[in-house]
Image (tube, helix red, strand yellow):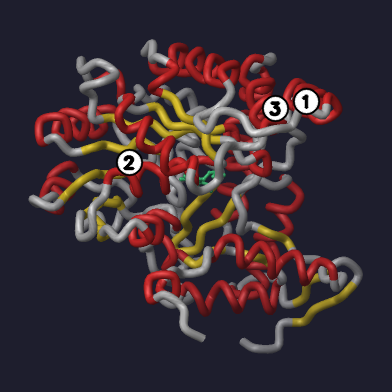
Amino acid sequence: MSLSQLARSIAESPTLRLNEEARILREKGEPVINLGIGEPKNKAPINAILQGAARLTSGDVKYTPTDGLPSLKKAIIRYTEETYDRLVAPENVIASDGAKQCLFNILFTLCNPQDEVVVLAPYWVSYPEIIRMCQAIPVIVTPEDGGFHPRFEEVVRAVGSNTKAIILNSPNNPSGAVYSDDFVGRMVEFCETKGIYLILDDIYQKLVFDGLRPKPGTAFTRADSESTKLIIVNGVAKLYGMTGFRVGWTIAPRELVRVMTNVQAQTTSCVSPAMQVAAEGALVGVQNVVESLRLTIQNNRDVLMQELRTFNGVKLRKPEGTFYALVDFRAYSNNSVELSNFLLKKALVVTVPGKEFGMEGHLRLSFAGTVKELQEAVARMKWALDPTSANEIYLGDRKLVRDWM
Ligand code: PMP
């Protein structure tokens, strides 16, 4: 078949593929535990459901303005004012089908072929692929100390005359690391001096633990909404656990938003009005859902850490935010793809290979599920890998005996 070289070169999303594999196994009756996908178990906030449903029952489900319903934009402007201490105009806001489409639109709008976009490892799997879809080149900065916090000087070294933008994602998927205020501040100052765009993927912004209160990127600039080099990406997926609603938004200078709107108009036209109204419902409704989700996830993180501490050989770094831990399994294998496949086959636990995030030898474990699932999953993983753990295990009422060590 004659398909485009570019399209053929785009990798499948490993997290969505693993999710699908887990679903198929579950349908066959296998008791799979999915630590792959980043999706909390909560129901969407009631106000989101009621508003979205009311819009559907009204039958008024037509095209909306491409950049979003004015009422949704108003709610986004309020969120931005409260969270970033920055009053933006409706022309600085565009709503898209999830943060993923925001990122695609931003990079498609900014990049010429061969422009470079700097990405810090460990990174979200989709960044390099989206950058390449926009004909630009991902330049990966890997912390030399093997950790999760690239140093400012390492990032500066990766910047050259073709650098168009740098993406910062903190709290970070997949490591759960929160970058220091000092680092973010220096990045903002550096980008504004150099005239490089700094894309802040703030999708996990409210999911931080242990009383941490990182400052938003906007705290480090005096530039106004039009001259700033900061582009902010956000959405309802992780903020309210509304992943399937597919609503995200971008805050950027108006010229950028204007061109992004043209790009969106020629691809998806607009976000479904029912989903826009639902996102607005979440944003204007009671906000204690955000805190209760955060507390649940923090407790899950604590349970996962406690379970993993008794896992021989694995090296842990405590996530400071998000719902992911990137755990070092090099004591068992340097090949994270093989290890992840092995765990799925033997223990029916889905994990994501660290290789996908630029961290070979690690596995990303999502702790967005339930405490019971986390405990059971780690017990199964220990059984599959750690010879000092029990030789037998039950999957439901099926007894399994370890026979390969
Ligand atoms: N950025 C990061 C870092 C993410 O982890 C994700 C989702 N996993 C997204 C963006 C995309 O979010 P959305 O579901 O709103 O498209």
Residue 308: percent from left, percent from top: 57, 55
Q: Amino acid at mark 2?
A: Leu
Residue 222: percent from left, percent from top: 20, 15
Q: Is residue 87 left or right of residue 375?
A: left
Judging depth in this view, the residue of 323 and 259 nearest the camera is 259
Residue 312: percent from left, percent from top: 53, 65
Q: Secondary structure at mark 1?
A: helix
Q: Is residue 94 left or right of residue 238?
A: left
Q: For the residue carrying disc 3, how many other residues have a C-alpha within 10 Å: few (<14), some (14-19), or many (20+)?
A: many
Marks 1,2: beta carbons within 8 A? no
Q: For the residue carrying disc 1, how many other residues have a C-alpha within 10 Å: few (<14), some (14-19), or many (20+)?
A: some
Q: Amino acid at mark 1?
A: Arg
Q: Secondary structure at mark 3?
A: helix
Q: Is residue 265 above or below residue 78?
A: below
Label 1 – label 2 distance at C-alpha: 36 Å
Q: Is mark 2 within 8 Å of ligand 1?
A: no
Tell me the residue that label 1 is attached to. 55
Residue 208 in sight here: no
Please tell me whether mark 1 or mark 2 is closer to you in this view: 1
Circle nearer the N terminus (3, 1): 1
Label 3 – label 1 distance at C-alpha: 9 Å
Q: Amino acid at mark 3?
A: Ala
Q: Is residue 177 left or right of residue 34?
A: left
Tell me the residue that label 2 is attached to. 168
Tell me the residue that label 3 is attached to. 278
Quadrant housing residue 10 = bottom left
For the image, the number of numbered tags is 3
Judging depth in this view, the residue of 110 and 330 nearest the camera is 110
Q: Secondary structure at mark 2?
A: strand
Q: Is mark 1 within 8 Å of ligand 1?
A: no
